[in-house]
Amino acid sequence: MRVNARLRCLRCGYSGPGNGPLCPRCGFPLITEPRNTLRIDRDKPSILRYASVLNYGPRVVSLGEGFTRIRRINGVMIKDESRNPTGSFMDRGSSVLISNVKGEVKVLFEEDFTLSIATYANAAGINVRVYVDPDRVGAYPELLRLSIMNNVSVEFGSKREVNVYYGEPLFLDGIKTIAYELYEQVGEIQGVVLPMERGYLALAVYEGFRELREWGFIGELPKLVLVKHRAGQMTDVGNWLVETANARVVNVGDEETIRSMIELARSGMYVKPVSAMAYAVASTLGRDYVAVITGTGVKEYRVGRELGGLTKLQEAIIGVLEGSRPLTAYEVWERLGGVATIQGVYKALGSLVKRGLVTFNYEVRGNKKVRVYSLLSNYK
């Protein structure tokens, strides 16, 4: 897609316009120049905190992505990207990219990326045409989720009228906010452990930290540790990060991956193998490394506004939310006066959201992003 922002190639130094995701001079992924020096809007509980530098288009499309929590599991510091709307860091990029889109999106089926793009396009009222190679589907849950979205049409075969690609400069513009948030939430860190498939995530995070150093927010760039399956191949981007940014590559095998998936699941995180590999490596590096973890990429949404069949707890929660400001689950539990456990309130709120009776958003309270619930005005 054509990008109005100024583009730059980190490898060959090209600077200028572009009509695709790759440098017209050397074929390396292009990045966007920041619009300005970073000014953090700490009242915004999403990547809109960094809107001063992000290249949003004529409209802002946001579903509350970003400002995801930092947590520790078995001593490993984790950036929990499963908290994004579709369960993936991809949502950061989709927010910026879709805000620049005019007309129909045509995209190849690429699991989390396509699901995220379609979800944000739906929020913007944009139709999406997904091209699927029937011999290389693999990720059936994501394909099924796409197939029931009203704005998506799925076509099989070799037709390739694609106008949006994974790795677009505007997409990477949103992804680099992971680095900004790590600076805000942790400060200067020793290193970041990142899953490496094609290397776009690592390239965007590197650029985010490079900008922070250029603006004087940090002194040194954190070390980048790129994790891949031992049978996987190095990519052009990965090789450049090793040569230029002194990144380190670590290979992980199947047994380590499966053990890490089980360990994370027992802590309440259900992740794909590529994220489990990052966790496995981070667990060997010490407490000053952060592993970037994403979730399954699939969430279930059911819409139905009928009030029949509500439990007594669900009816009580509706009574609490009616006429109230947005409340956290804990605040709802407090107002219920001990008629249920906090776990029961969380479960009941989740069911009400799925039924389309309650909605949630995010607010910043203190230095934390919290989820708050509201009753939909037309719930009756």
Image (cartoon, rainbow, N blue to C red):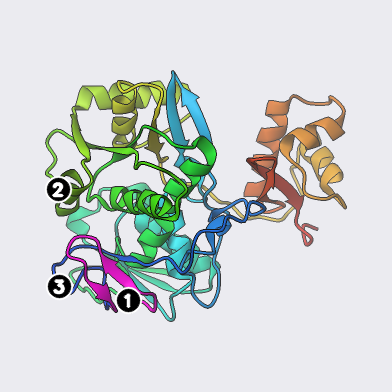
State the residue in front, 270 or 200.
200
Name the residue carrying label 3.
Answer: 25
Q: How many residues crowd mark 2 within 10 Å: few (<14), some (14–19), many (20+)?
A: some
Q: Please state the horizontal and vertical placement of residue 217, each as a whole percent of the image.
A: 47, 48
Name the chief secondary structure element in magenta: loop
State the residue in front, 223 or 170.
223
- Mark seen at residue 100: none
Alpha carbon separation for disc pair 3 and 1: 17 Å
Highlighted magenta segment, given as a residue range: 1-17
In the rendered structure, which disc, 1 or 2, sits on the residue that comes first in sequence?
1
Q: Nearer the viewer, mark 3 or mark 1?
A: 3
Alpha carbon separation for disc pair 2 and 3: 18 Å
Name the residue carrying label 1.
Answer: 1
* Residue lying furthest top: 74
Could you tell me which secondary element the residue under label 1 belongs to?
A: loop
- Mark seen at residue 239: 2
In the image, taking residue 54 as reference, residue 141 lies left or right, namely left
Q: Is residue 6 magenta?
A: yes
Q: Is residue 47 magenta?
A: no
